[in-house]
Image (cartoon, rainbow, N blue to C red):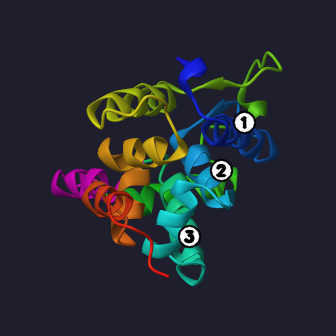
C-alpha cells in the first residue's frame, strides 16, 4: 500500500512516527498522524487545514487532544455514556493522577513495559491508513496523498475526529474544500 503514497503522505507517516518518539509513545496513533499533518506546509492537506482550522485555533485543538489523552483516549461521547451509568470519568482521572501523576492514564509510554525499540502503529492508526486507501479509491485518485489521510481521520470517528469536528474540520468540510479551488 505504501507504494501508492505520495511524497507528502509518506512524510506525514514519518512525521507521525517522529511525534510518537518525541512524546515517548510506544505506538503511533491517529493523534500522531494529525500532529504530523499540522506540521506540513505546501500540501493539499495543509492548505485545507489552514482554511478550516487556522493557526490561531490550533492551541485549542491541541488542548482537546491533550484532554482526551488524560481521559485514557475516551471521547466525550464515551465519557457521557459512562456518566449515564453513574461513572464519573473526571473523578477517576483525578484520583489516578493523584496517586500516579499527571497523564498516568495516557497508557502510551515506552516505559510502561517491555519495548522493542521500534515504533509500531496502533490498530486505530492502521485503520486510518487503510481508510485513506479506500477514500482515495472512492475519489478515483491514483495515489494516496496527505489529504486522504486527513479525510480518513475525519471519517473514522473517535477522539481525533471529535476534536477536529469541534474546530470545523469534518469529512464534509474537508471534501468540499478539496473540491473547490483555493481562494486567492
Residue tagged 2: 36
* In this view, the mark in front (1 or 3): 1
Instruction: Check contact, mark 1 vs mark 3: CB within 8 A.
Output: no
Say whether residue 105 is visible. no
Q: Is residue 128 above or below residue 94?
A: above
Cα–Cα gap, marks 3 and 2: 16 Å
Residue at disc 2, secondary structure? helix
Q: Nearer the viewer, residue 2 or 66?
A: 2
Where is residue 23? Give x, y as percent. Answer: 76, 47
Residue 82 on the magenta span: yes
* In this view, the mark in front (3 or 2): 2
Residue at disc 1, secondary structure? helix
How packed mark 3 is, by other alpha carbons closer than 10 Å (few <14, some 14-19, many 20 or more), is few
Image: magenta residue range: 74-87
Where is residue 166? Give x, y as percent. Answer: 35, 70
Instruction: Check contact, mark 3 vs mark 2: CB within 8 A.
Output: no
- The answer to which of marks 3 and 2 sits earlier in the sequence is 2
Q: Is residue 177 left or right of residue 4?
A: left
Amino acid at each position: 500500500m505504501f507504494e501508492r503514497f505520495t511524497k507528502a503522505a509518506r512524510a506525514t507517516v514519518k512525521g507521525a512516527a517522529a511525534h510518537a518518539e518525541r512524546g515517548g509513545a510506544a505506538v503511533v496513533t491517529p493523534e500522531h498522524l494529525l500532529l504530523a499533518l499540522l506540521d506540513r506546509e505546501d500540501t493539499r492537506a495543509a492548505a485545507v487545514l489552514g482554511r478550516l482550522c487556522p493557526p490561531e485555533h490550533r492551541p485549542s485543538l491541541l488542548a482537546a487532544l491533550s484532554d482526551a489523552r488524560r481521559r485514557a483516549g475516551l471521547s466525550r461521547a464515551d465519557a457521557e455514556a459512562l456518566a449515564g451509568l453513574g461513572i464519573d470519568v473526571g473523578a477517576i482521572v483525578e484520583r489516578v493522577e493523584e496517586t500516579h501523576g499527571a497523564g498516568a492514564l495516557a497508557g502510551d509510554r515506552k516505559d510502561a513495559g517491555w519495548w522493542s525499540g521500534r515504533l509500531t502503529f496502533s490498530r486505530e492508526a492502521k485503520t486510518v491508513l487503510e481508510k485513506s486507501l479506500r477514500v482515495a479509491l472512492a475519489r478515483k485518485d491514483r495515489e494516496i496523498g496527505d489529504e486522504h489521510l486527513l479525510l480518513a481521520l475525519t471519517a473514522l470517528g473517535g477522539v481525533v475526529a471529535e476534536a477536529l469536528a469541534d474546530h470545523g474540520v469534518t469529512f464534509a468540510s474537508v471534501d468540499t474544500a478539496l473540491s473547490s479551488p483555493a481562494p486567492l
